[in-house]
Amino acid sequence: MTIYGDGRVEYAGKEHVKVKESRSGHLDAAAIKALASQFAQAKFLSLPSDDYTEANCKCRRCTDMATAMVEIKVGSVSHQMNHYYGCGCPPKALFELELAIDKAAKSEQWTGDTSKQGPMATTCFG
């Protein structure tokens, strides 16, 4: 899913989602401003790019979980992270940012309700 500064939302479902095709939506200016505030509150630009991947997780790690890829581009500044949900290291603010993005874009209409889904055969280490 991509959210643009003008409020456009583009979604392309591939696997393990309710809608496996392209969809679009729109956010109003207040929602865009609120998301920008969430990025700042999470100190997203200062978070390490790869510390929360499955391969680089340095604390408790569980298998068979989803990964969120979050990126922000403002002018010439950009920062991208891959956050493996099985890694217990990330700050709470990152989880809250990801939730705010999904809530603002109403992504559940395309992904389905994933809040109560648990992974099958999950194993945790550390």
Image: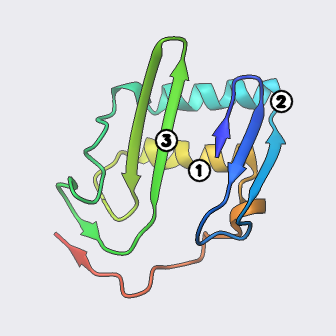
Q: Position of residue 124 (x, y in %)?
A: 26, 76
Residue that mark 3 sits on: 70
| Residue 28 appears left or right of 51 | right
Is 89 or 56 nearer to us in this picture? 56
Q: Residue at x 64, y 39 (%)?
A: 2
Does the rendering let one see residue 119? yes
In the image, residue 47 sits, relative to residue 110, either above or below, namely: above
Return the residue found at the far top.
75
Crowd tier of the residue under label 1, counting other residues whose Cα lies within 10 Å: few below 14, some 14–19, many 20 or above: few
Q: Secondary structure at mark 1?
A: helix
The percent coordinates of residue 116 (x first, y second) are 60, 76
* Residue at x 30%, y 59% (from the top left corner): 88
Residue 66 found in image quarter: bottom left
Q: Residue at x 53, y 23 (%)?
A: 73
Q: Amino acid at mark 3?
A: Val
Nearer the observer: mark 2 or 3; the answer is: 3
Instruction: Name the residue located 45 percent from the left edge and 42 percent from the top edge.
Output: 93
In the image shown, does 54 or 117 lie closer to the viewer?
54
Q: Which three-letter amino acid code belongs to the residue tagged 2?
A: Asp
Q: Are marks 2 and 3 in contact (CB under 8 Å)?
A: no
